[in-house]
Image (cartoon, helix red, strand yellow):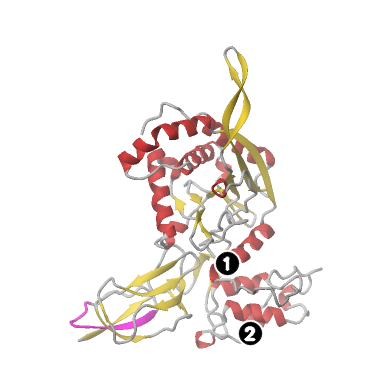
Amino acid sequence: MASVEMLMPKMGESIIEGTILTWLKNEGDAIEQDESVLEVATDKVDTEVPATHGGILKKILVKEGDVVAVGAPIAIIETSGEVAETESPSVPETVDQKEELVAAAPANTDTILQQPEPVESVTTEDGRFYSPLVRSIAKEEGISAAELSKIPGTGKDGRVTKQDMLSYLKNRTSAPSTSTQGKSQAAPSISEPKVQVSISATDEIIEMDRMRKMIAQRMVDSKRISPHVTSFVEADMTNIVLWREKNKNAYKEKYGEPITYTPFFIEAVAKAIRDFPMINISVDGDRIIKKKNINIGMAVALPSGNLIVPIIKNADQLNLVGISKQVNDLANRARTNKLNADDLSGGTYTVSNVGSFGNVMGTPIIPQPQVAIMAVGAIVKKPAVVETPTGDVIAIRHKMFLSHSYDHRVVDGSLGGMFVRRVADYLEAFDMNSTF
């Protein structure tokens, strides 16, 4: 018999820790290699973790609710034979990561934030480990290292949790901390309630779930960080509507899956980004980071009512069929909770289809650290003036509004407006004779 440590696996780019949600097996249970043993939540996605070896789950080392670093032991498995020595992954002492990566935060209930500002996660001089989220809250609220070290922690080994921080901020005195002295006026706390809510006996109180709390925080963060401006354009979708109606049955018969309107939107956006690459950027302080890859996120509605944004990587290198296959695959896996962390990382631009909710237009909130997002509305039949070789005529056309929200710090109205106009031009110029 041999014993082997099961370690917290790496679950995607920039993920350095996860929260233990549920143990699916108990101590003493027989388990097979690759059988799901527990469920872990990260800032991006909830996922099941398979056993690294088959045998008996001898000991569980971490409790449900614990936050565990990647590479840390989480259980001991007793195997029937000798286990070959493998190199254990090490956890770096210092990790540059994206704080609160967008797993799932719908913007105005129509999109989800993915990647906020970089935050460093280290063990400090007081010997306590502070998670990226805790350090981010401390920085946002002007809490010095000395003040942070005095906050009691309720997590494992006295670790400070997000709830500890929020409880501390709620009862914090109004005296300015060391880091905020000398400023003319401290920024208002985004964690403190601004208005006392009156509750009557007929009201129902619903506790926010973990995803909704992240959504709320990220919405506030994005509106605080980026001055939002929205430009609108109405596009004529008649060519695309007629082509899809003509070909959707043959397409499904050939590929075994439907073709929706989303691939057409993503294809047009990818083409427009190549024409206007300064839309495909991020902001890092006083620097602009111009992205080479065009990775487009698409908002997907979950059965819970929340939305999540999986990413289509290098969308400009795919044809319509390739985009459609990725759209269907990511949407199906999102709805069955089978996305992994990499499916949700690396987005450089986001598209949200508010038309799927019957809305004609919307003003979406930008996923940080991206600088723009586009909402596409419902396709509606309208009378319109159409130019013909023999003169103008009034005809019934399929119209759709495009709403382009952008960060006015780095995207001016001319660029933001020209970009959404170019997307509409590509949609309107769709070739009716296209084949698949």
Q: Is mark 2 on a helix, strand or loop?
A: loop
Q: Would you identify the image quadrant in which residue 401 lies?
A: top right
Of badges 1 and 2, the one in the foreground is 1
CA–CA distance in space, label 1 to label 2: 25 Å
Which mark identifies residue 151? Answer: 2
Query: Alpha-carbon neighbours of circle 2 within 10 Å: few (<14), some, or many (≥20)?
Result: some
Q: Mark 1 vs mark 2: which is more N-terminal?
A: 2
Task: Please give the range of residues in magenta.
Answer: 73-84
Q: Nearer the viewer, residue 412 or 419?
A: 419
Position of residue 10 measured from the top left corner of the image (x, y, whole percent) = 39, 68
Outermost residue on the left side: it is 81
Q: Would you identify the image quadrant in which residue 380 lies?
A: top right
Instruction: Specify the quadrant that holds the N terminus.
Output: bottom left
Residue designated by label 1: 212
Residue at (35, 73) in percent of width and height: 89
Amino acid type of the residue that numbered disc 2 sits on in the rendered structure: Ile
Asked if residue 287 is positioned above or below residue 81 in the image, the reply reads above
Asked if residue 436 is positioned above or below residue 18 in the image, the reply reads above
